[in-house]
Amino acid sequence: MVDLAAPGPATLALLEPADVIAAVPYLLGYRPDRSVIVLALSRLPSAAGAPPRSRLRSVSRTDIPAAADAATVARELVAESAAEGVAEVVVVVFGRAPATLWPCLEAELAARRIGIRDALRVEAGRWWSHLCADPACCPPDGTPVLEPTVPGGPARVAATLVAAGLAVLPSRQALSDLVRPDRGLDRLRVERAVARAGGSVGARLAADPRTARSLRAETLALLGATVRGHLTPGGAGPLPVATVARLVVGVHHPAVFDRCGRGPEWTAGRRGAAGLAVWAELLRRAPAGWSCGPGLILAAVASRYGDAPLARAAASQVRAAGPMAPLAGRLARLVDTPSSR
């Protein structure tokens, strides 16, 4: 049995392969295709004679490699999963992998003394276990993957994860689109507005460094008003360009950055959910060189709010944008998400 700590107080027990397969899309945030997923587990105490129990530690994913790249990909994937305390893994392959991949994974896991709880392949609506040759439970032609809504399907898994606030997008691209930078005329307007806002803030600080406290208070007040606007009916439309510019510049103040990524007023309840939408919009609309602050805050808030897929997507977008300037050192302590390639 694998215990999966869902967002909030819920703990979900994954009792069989069908439960694991049903949970993976919620853990990633999208339906995987041509993917190798490693669920890294730590062992939990269990009563004598009871089935072994484990706790999910992290989720790692990569594309199915070509045969020639299997050894390299296996090495990187296992290294990514092998955090302290990881005792075993469940491997799930969505699609047909080259025959060289499994021996490479076995060798890398054995070298790190990590056990294998199960190894599953999902293809064409059916699943197989690489470790089970008993036709009574693992027929040679595979076992149908059932949707949660059909009789006998993993309704318990889906219901628990949906109630915890997790959702499944149709593809990895759809998840990336939530934080992908906007293009076109709006971006040009925001770039000009950010340049003006940055110049204004810089001039105020140069004239009197003591204005830093006032600037911080102004940014937090504007952010609070913006989040409250998202909580009112009809208030979740696109933010005005001037608001985007002022917030994008303001969140790069270290004190604002730390408070937004840590403060309970921004990371829980309805306010936290509205904040996720605000930070995602700021990340999409921020000009090049200004996405670090909104992106890292989105990753931190999403992680604390229980949306690990969005947290990983935001952190990935920040890394893709280039150097993270002076805020890079805060990533480790603000963002605590399972790794995913």
Image: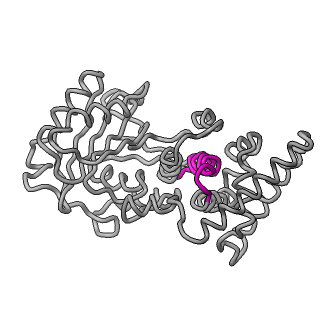
Q: Is residue 137 above or below residue 159?
A: above
Queried whether the magenta region covers residue 298, the answer comes back as yes
Q: Main secondary structure of the magenta part?
A: helix
The total number of labels drawn is: 0
From where the camera sits, is residue 305 visible? no
**Residue 276 x %, y %:** 62, 58
Queried whether the magenta region covers residue 56, the answer comes back as no
**Residue 142 x %, y %:** 13, 55
Based on the displayed image, in which of its 4 quarters is residue 119 positioned? top left
Quick one: 287 or 304, which is closer to the camera? 287
Q: Is residue 327 above or below residue 125?
A: above
Describe residue 173's horizontal placement relative to residue 191 as left or right. left
Q: Is residue 293 above or below residue 107?
A: below
Identify the residue at horizontal 51%, vertical 41% (top origin): 337
From where the camera sits, is residue 303 visible? yes
Q: Quadrant of the C terminus?
A: top left
Quick one: 230 or 46, which is closer to the camera? 230
Identify the residue at horizontal 22%, vertical 44% (top origin): 65
**Residue 76 x %, y %:** 32, 33
Identify the residue at horizontal 15%, vertical 41% (top origin): 67
**Residue 159 x %, y %:** 44, 61
Q: In which quarter of the image is the N terminus?
A: top left
Describe residue 338's horizontal placement relative to residue 226 as left or right. left
* Colour scheme employed for the rendering of this structure: one colour
Q: Residue furthest bottom?
A: 234
Quick one: 281 or 324, which is closer to the camera? 324
Identify the residue at horizontal 82%, vertical 54% (top origin): 200
Q: Give the range drawn in magenta.
A: 286-307
